[in-house]
Each structure stands twice: as C-alpha cells, then as structure tokens.
Image: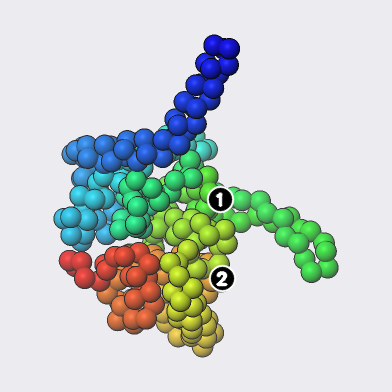
Amino acid sequence: MPALILAITIVIGAIFWWLGLPALRARRRVAISLEPLPHAWQQWLRDDVPAYPRLPSTLQQRLHGLIQIFVRQKSFVGCNGLVVTERMKVVIAANACLLVLNRPGVPRENLYDDLLSILIYPTPFIVRENHRHASGLVSEGARVLSGQAWDSRRIILSWEDIEHAPSLGHNVVLHEFAHYLDMEDETMDGAPGLASPAEFREWSTIFWEEYDRLRANLQAGLPSLIDPYAATAPAEFFAVVTEVFFGRPHELDQQHPLLYQQLRKYYRLDPARWES
Ligand SMILES: [Zn+2]
C-alpha cells in the first residue's frame, strides 16, 4: 500500500511540475531580460543593426532584454566550417527580436518559442529540391539561397548576406523571421496570424491590391521601392515589405501608406516616427 501511495504522489508531483513549466520558463526569461547588456554588445548593435540607433530608448531597453533571452536560449550552429562568434549571435538576435518587440506576451511567451536552432553558413548555400511537374514527372533542381525558414525548429542564414546587405531596405534576418511568423498559422501565404477575421479581410484586401500593383508596375518597367523579388509569391511579398518597413519606413509610409499602416498594426511599431 505505501508503494501505491508513493507512486500516486510521484505521478501527481510530475503533473504539477509539467503544468508549472510555462510559468517557470516565463519567470526565467524575465530574470534574464533584466540582466545588463554587455558593453561590447551595445557597440555591435550601434554598428551592425541599422534600425537600432533610431529606436526610442524605451524600445532599445526592451530589445536588450529580448536579445539576452534569444542568445541564451537558442542554439547557433556554424555550417561549412563557420565559427559562430558572439557578434553574429547578437546581430541575428537583434534583428529577429525587433519583429516581436511589442508583441503581446513577449518576453514570457511568443518569442519564437518553438525555434531551436539558427544554422549559419559563411556564404549563400545550395538547397537541392524536387519539383513535380503537371505531367507527374519529378525533376531535381538546386537553388542558391541567402536564408531559409526551414521549419518551426530551424532557420538557415548566410552570414555574408547579413554582413554585407546590398542596401538599406535589404535584411535577410528580418526576411526569414518574417517567413517564420507567417508560418505560425501553419501556412506560409503572406498573411501571418491576425487577431480577428475582420483584420484578416482588411489585410488580404490591401496586400493583394499592393501585390497586384507591384506586378503590374514591374511588367510596365516602372521603378519600385519594393524589390522585384516580392512579386514572386505573396509570402515573399510579406517578407520583403517587412524588410522595407524597418529599413526604409519613411519611403514606405509615403509611397504605400495603406500597406505601411497594416504592417504598423501587425508589428505594433511605427518606425517612420523613430528618429532619422
Ligand atoms: Zn523569402
């Protein structure tokens, strides 16, 4: 009989421990976020994260906390011989956390909770893919990528593309983490999880209009603030305009005000109003 009581006690204890895990994790995250940011990290943020110097100081402080959690709790894996440095971790974490800076629940939850690893290649990497044709035939192809939101557990990035972004509106970390957010509702379709059906309808209407307009303008040979790659799929459109939203917010607000407003509402941030 005592053995039975002991077994029941152990099972009940295990259930309470398991139920208490999210609360434990949340408390741990809050504690980590309150630790002071190392001096060198602040310098890297100023030098290597273009949006950082423009952030209001309250948001900078908030970002410091999220970076500490992200760096501590995610695994960074160097591929093809790359040795991952602390600076790489901080720069990637800062850009990833920028997207969720004002997200409800953060930092206790909603901080890329399912993501385990960031795989970093020194240069763009090759991905082999099978393509099924309408005829049923399958052909094998290869693509060279700067980044890939592989699944809910892994994101792959090329350090060369992070370090030497071709222009202010390009940011491969923002791009891939926008894909990650897009995938959270199980589909990567250019519409991340939104709060209500009404918000989804509004988002869809504006995004489809902007997407069609971009494709029409590109076909007509007109110049565009938004990189042509955005016109390849709705999911790419969302990822690319996220890059522009943080990299060239004033121009996006002026040239595409409805699109800007949708992104402002989703990210709960207003980068066009930050210092220039
Ligand atoms: Zn993409």
Where is residue 16? Give x, y as percent.
45, 31
Task: Indicate the position of residue 105 as horizontal and vertical percent values.
Answer: 35, 52
Q: Is residue 208 left or right of residue 67?
A: right
In the foreground, 105 or 209:
105
Tell me if I can see residue 174 in this picture: yes
Depth check: give the residue in front, 50 or 184.
Answer: 184
Counting from the top left corner in percent of width and height, residue 115 is at 48, 45
Give the structural element (helix, strand or loop) at label 1.
loop
User: Which residue is at the front of the view, 1 or 125?
Assistant: 1
Amino acid tagged 1: Trp
- Rendered residue at 53%/60% (across/down): 185
Residue 62: x, y in percent?
24, 50
**Relative side of 213 to 166, left or right:** right
Q: Is residue 220 above or below residue 228?
A: below
Near mark 1 (Cα within 10 A), the count class, few <14, some 14-19 or many ≥20, is: some
* Screen quadrant of the N terminus: top right
Q: Residues within 10 Å of mark 2 (few under 14, many from 20)?
A: few
Quadrant for the C terminus in the image: bottom left
Query: Callout 2, which amino acid?
Result: Ala
Q: First in sequence, mark 2 or 1: give its number.
A: 1
Q: Is mark 2 within 8 Å of ligand 1?
A: no
The residue to which callout 1 is attached is 150
Which residue is denoted by mark 2 in the rendering?
233
Q: Residue at x 20, y 61 (%)?
A: 54
> Could you tell me if residue 82 is visible in this image?
no
Q: Is residue 184 above or below residue 89?
A: below
